[in-house]
Amino acid sequence: MKIKVVLLGLLLNAVNVFAQADYKPSTSNLEARKLFQEARFGMFIHWGVSSVLGHGEWVMNERNIHVSDYKHLQDFFNPQKFDAQKWVATAKGAGMKYITFITRHHDSFSNWDTKQSDWKITNTPYGKDVLKQLADECHKQGIKLVLYYSLLDWYRTDYQYWTGRTGQGTGRTEKGDWNNYIKFMKNQLTELLTNYGEISGIWFDGHWDQTAPEGEKDRSSRLDWHYDEIYTLIHTLQPQCLIGNNHHLSPFSGEDFQMFERDLPGQNKSGLSFQEASDKLPLETCETLNGSWGYNITDTKYKSAHEIIRLLVNAASLNANLLLNIGPMPNGEIQPEFSTRLDSVGKWMQKYGNSVYGTKGSEIKSQTWGVITEKDKEIYLHVFDSNKTEIIIDNFPYKPSKLSLFNVDAALNYSFSKGQLKIDLTKVARDDFDTVLKLKVKRK
């Protein structure tokens, strides 16, 4: 019987992918992809009722908290210090161009006034729709808004938890109607794309709950997620809205960007990124500012501004955005440890941001001294190694015409012979985080 169920799931998944094979993005969608790729830097916000426990967003699963107990958190979630203006201003001040906000994580709690569930923020003592406030502020301050939405669910009974890899210890015994769960998700997505103005993207997560563990050869889904219906719904309601799915697989038809969790494209240090980087879709790396996604009161492993800037530049050199996560406290405040680091990054971006925004990855791969980003007839050499006295690049693919420090017009000396570019750094003023050189070139 189990074999028949698995075979049926594989068949449905194959039909599902086939059904989307004729997807052709609209003109507005293609333009949105271009703007997304040029943005290069965004803020991820993991926040919700789970933050009350101060142990990250996976606490319900990790502690096997039963639904009957977990639902009491709704009575304690009262983020009186939530300030949408401050959240958006913090992102904007850091040089970020978009925010990806958790509307519903795996614990199923909705951060908006959904009509599809009573398990939502407007039924807490706080009682307000934080998504409405955040969306209004993003539109006011010119920050794009992407909405994270969890496909898997540890709370509802109509999610087929018994076939999933997580959430089996939350006390559910009823096995509900899968089609009802699909309908529930479609109705929620319709609300999100109808009631909150322009939405720049939907960021799906959780597909992997119904696949074989990472590393196994067969990673096909055990369920039919109805992506043809869901993706068509999104692109119909808002054609420009980009769809990404954190399934750790090659992009499915109907998806508009590809993400990598805790990895740069082409790397798999986290053990999550087995997929190859697409050469057709915009790319994004998501990473945490400390070690956790949601608020974790004991996690003090904060990345320095130095590490964040290098992570951002490394991502850009591989043609990818950096989506950097914060997990605000349950009272709605952003931790000062996050704010101070983002402020430092923002000051650097004010000076050097144009060596990141709108750039493309370089065919010149990572060097021992740093990396390269490119834009039109300029390439930017990001020198991370402050002790390096000389740069040598063999087989340099362009003809250089002028070298200078970024935002400084005075020319610097270099030599170029038989395809070898050589730059003397002994008299070059260094930046504490990343010394950026601008080299004008003639492309072949």
Image (cartoon, rainbow, N blue to C red):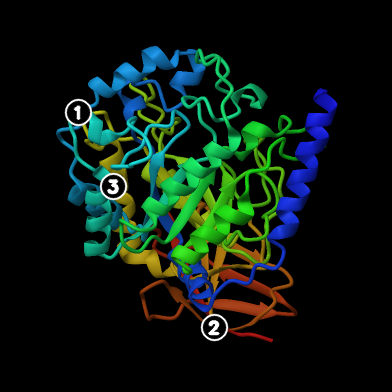
Residue 390 seen by the camera: no
In front of the other: 70 or 320: 70
Count of residue discs: 3
The amino acid type of the residue labelled 1 equals Asn
Residue 192 appears at what percent x and percent y?
38, 52
The amino acid type of the residue labelled 3 equals Leu
Residue 150 appears at what percent x and percent y?
49, 39
The amino acid type of the residue labelled 2 equals Lys
> Which residue is label 3 attached to?
131
Residue 267 appears at what percent x and percent y?
67, 46
In front of the other: 324 or 84: 84
The span from disc 1 to disc 2 (Cα, nearest Å) is 52 Å
Residue located at (47% from left, 69% from top): 240
Q: Quadrant of the N terminus?
A: top right
- Nearer to us of marks 1 and 2 is 1
> Which residue is label 1 attached to?
78
Residue located at (26% from left, 42% from top): 340
Residue located at (42% from left, 57% from top): 41
Q: Alpha-carbon neighbours of circle 3 within 10 Å: few (<14), some, or many (≥20)? A: many
> Which residue is label 2 attached to?
377
Residue 103 appears at what percent x and percent y?
38, 42
Sequence order check, earlier mark of 3 and 1: 1
